[in-house]
Amino acid sequence: MQNHLNEVDFGTPKRVSEREVTLEIDGTPVTVPAGTSLMRAAVDAGIKVPKLCATDSLEPFGSCRLCLVEIEGRRGYPASCTTPAEAGMKVRTQSDKLQQLRKGVMELYISDHPLDCLTCGANGNCELQDMAGVTGLRNVRYGFDGANHLDAKKDESNPYFTYDPSKCIVCNRCVRACEETQGTFALTIEGRGFESRVSPGQGESFMDSECVSCGACVEACPTATLQEKSVIWLGQAEHSVITTCAYCGVGCGFKAEMKGTQVVRMVPWKDGQANEGHSCVKGRFAWGYATHQDRMLKPMIRRKITDPWQEVSWDEAINHAANEFRRIQQEHGRESIGGITSSRCTNEETYLVQKLVRAAFGNNNVDTCARVCHSPTGYGLKQTLGESAGTQTFASVDHSDVILVIGANPTDGHPVFASRLKRRLRQGAQLIVIDPRRIDLVRSPHVQAAHHLQLKPGTNVAVITAFAHVIVSEGLVDEAFVAERCEAKSFNEWRNFVTRAEHSPEATEAITGVSAAELRAAARLFARGMNGRRNAAIYYGLGVTEHSQGSTMVMGIANLAMATGNVGREGVGVNPLRGQNNVQGSCDMGSFPHELPGYRHVSDSTIRAEFEAAWGVALDAEPGLRIPNMFDAALGGSFKGLYCQGEDIAQSDPNTQHVSAALSAMECIVVQDLFLNETAKFAHVFLPGSSFLEKDGTFTNAERRLSRVRKVMPPKAGLADWEVTQQLANALGYPMAYRHPAEIMAEIAALTPSFRGIDYAKLDRLGSVQWPCNDEAPEGTPTMHVERFVRGKGRFVITQYVATDEKVTRRFPLLLTTGRILSQYNVGAQTRRTDNNRWHAEDRLEIHPHDAEERGIREGDWVGIFSRAGETVLRALVTERMQPGVVYTTFHFPESGANVITTDNSDWATNCPEYKVTAVQVMPVMQPSTWQQAYRQNDREQQALLEAGRAVLDR
Ligand code: SF4
Ligand code: SF4
Ligand code: SF4
Ligand code: FES
């Protein structure tokens, strides 16, 4: 798995066909699927044809004329990239004539090229340079004095790559990459003939254009025209290591290109099964946080949180933490401490933390940040389908005819999947969006949703039940599927429930704000498909789960998929778009207080006995505390100690005042993190964390796909996170002696049926594996529930809409909902420490022009946002993306304090916080300049201003 620096470029994309053709290239017979280009067939035969405008990630274009070949019995010199292989062809890739033609082409290119190869950043990794060598170019007959582009101005506006038009050969690869791979259509070729040049928009720089800095054009460029600044600065890499992005749940495979232990660049891995060579701005470019000067590299302790930190050795910090935890347990009981696992860490690390809690702490007080995002997915899908995970691969969307996106914003949250989704839409699939906000997918270049149901926040369940009402009452149920695959009793009860008149779109329109006609049309499209093709897939995000009825909505989605027969094959399914890189894995690994690894309840004595035998301790049969229960118990005085790995609960959990009070009430908080985060303000022990570049392990993405994380540099603070947990367990008197994360995975596999067939050797061999992976599915399971549901028969669940307690009133007349933006990531600890701030330097409050005008708010004004829980201040972004009555913000900056205003309402089944609905009032608090100044000065002044604002509100 090491050194993929020079991957083979086949020139044109792979073709799939049942028909094969056999031909001869330079006398070598080769057999390829029909539709394969001559260029690709030649590479299969071990023959490289010179090329410049072709690359295997893009459709052939045929512009450079370098790849010409001769075909026996045919006239002329066809381009091998655009000519399909045919049975019986005899092809020659080398002849004097071809050599002469190719040289001529190269002469033209080189006559208008700076020829600064020795000082060029691409020196040694430039296709133009290679082709000059391959074609034997020795001189340029036209000289270098003619018209040229050598003085063309560089565009260095993008923080991560440059555009140097003097080196452009106008091969169009960048334009095609932006269209075909990324789907943004930011680039064009401006001008004609000699004047033609790549442009990110009329006279615009890359930064001012529609470009989202995904890097696809940079990757596609065969010259140094588009090039990473890190390569220009550091030079070409010496070796590479395949690893997995540590940002979002797409789980893109990357080649970390290295010089020694220094990252030169991160290149999306062509064979990465989740991303197939694509990436977004975060994984591709925003890795600088890993070596940022803010990294904490020394363990620290302090008696009280008001004391200064004291740097100590690892041993001292770990022993101090262990002694404190033992003291607390002696004084307050076994249940008085707990742990929080991290969805940013590897499966192996997460597994160790939950094991530490269960085996060394002796209780089940372990929880994870999935509590605040996808815990309703786990609950809802388990109840209905029998497994707490998504049903498909990302590639499955290539077979979807209708795509329903609910409460998710893939172009910002899951960008690489969004590119794939948009490609399918460009091929003709239909899109339905259910979202309070007009997300980019609703209308963007070459994409237009058939229906956007712009519902009021908090009314998801009413909408999904109305959807079901239309499907049942209009006879659109897939009766055969339901009869064969689902429980008759629960289906009949559900059918009777949804057909009640009160669930019709007409009856719910006033509650949901969604036009009955539009909802009916969308439901018909979903159930009927288009042109006789009926694959309908559902993708959803936190706009579904982070509600008081999050679990109900997940079950409503599963009901819909089952009723329309859209489960168990490619192109369909129920697909939660999971937020963090390893949130699926942290749930799989037993991070919830009621479940051992593999989602098995702690009260099951047979399962417990297996773990007790393997771990050598008696395990508690009672579920432990969830995160919100830990906070309540801390305030009640019974919960005193917390081990928190890689999770900033002080910033990410709702109702900040409540969380702060709970954390302040504890006696020993151990924070393990890369940075001194907000939670560390309440900590007594700080243990430096290790980044994904510093350790081995695995992440599990939203497709249930386990991919390897590989160490490319030693841990900066000396220990990887799993080693720290192991030492803490040992200090607590519970022995752990893993020598490598592979041994931890071996234990996970031995104890967890769905992981039984997984080991590092298999992951190295296959690239990645989707669980379940065991004797029945030795190479993993791309599609779930194929023959039968995991629980046997699919179960329908009644989805009674219950309005949230969070109501708008005259005092709080607007609804606030929250989300993410492409360039930043969650609490921003990583992305805020990169140049991604150039795209999003602060959180803004999006507000509809009518609401803004009513309040005298203009674009950019500072506004106070007041809820029943608290208040904060942001600048306004006036936009018609919002519907009147609804405002929106991201939560990437701690100073915006979005969670100061969210309430502590939560999902009835899982306690997942209701982040997506908060009743607020918004008002300009002060003249912008004065306000801005005060805001920046200190919190006290900010507080005073907000109090003044609230006084106005109270009048
Ligand atoms: S910028 Fe690069 S990829 Fe784009 S046309 Fe120029 S040489 Fe080709
Ligand atoms: S970086 Fe991505 S979005 Fe920007 S121009 Fe290149 S391909 Fe298009
Ligand atoms: S889509 Fe997600 S996993 Fe892929 S590069 Fe971007 S952040 Fe990383
Ligand atoms: S590579 Fe075939 S025409 Fe350019």
Image (cartoon, rainbow, N blue to C red):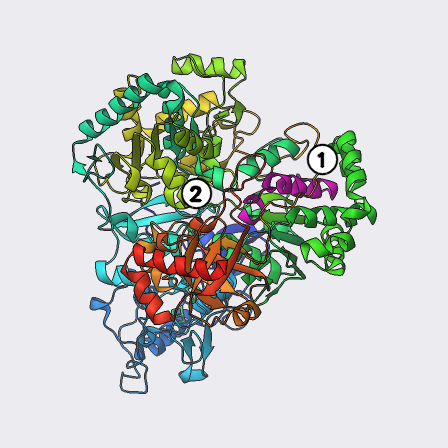
Q: Residues within 10 Å of mark 2 (few under 14, many from 20)?
A: many
N-terminal of the two: label 1 or label 2?
2
Q: Which residues are magenta?
A: 541-568
Position above or below: 640 against 6: above
Question: Which residue is located at x 81 percent, y 38 percent?
Answer: 496
Badge nearest the viewer, 1 or 2: 2
Element assignment for label 2: loop
- Mark 1 — residue? 796
Answer with the quarter of the image where residue 720 lies: top left
The answer to whether the beta carbon of the residue marked 1 is less than 8 Å from any atom of ligand 3 is: no
Position above or below: 529 against 739: below
The residue most toward the front is 955
Q: Position of residue 634 (x, y in %)?
A: 39, 30
- Identify residue type, mark 2: Asp
The residue most toward the bottom is 146
Q: Nearer the viewer, residue 819 or 11?
A: 819
Q: Position of residue 211 (x, y in %)?
A: 43, 67
In the shown orientation, is residue 746 left or right of residue 31? left
Q: Are marks 1 and 2 in contact (CB under 8 Å)?
A: no
Position above or below: 213 against 545: below
Answer with the quarter of the image where residue 926 lies: bottom left
Residue 653: mark in rendering:
2
Is most of the magenta stretch helix, strand or loop? Answer: helix
Question: Which residue is located at x 51 percent, y 47 percent?
Answer: 915
The answer to whether the beta carbon of the residue marked 2 is less than 8 Å from any atom of ligand 3 is: no
Question: Is-magenta flag for residue 546?
Answer: yes
- Identify residue type, mark 1: Phe
Ligand 2: which quarter? bottom left
Position of the N terminus, as image quadrant, is top left
Q: Nearer the viewer, residue 503 or 3?
A: 503
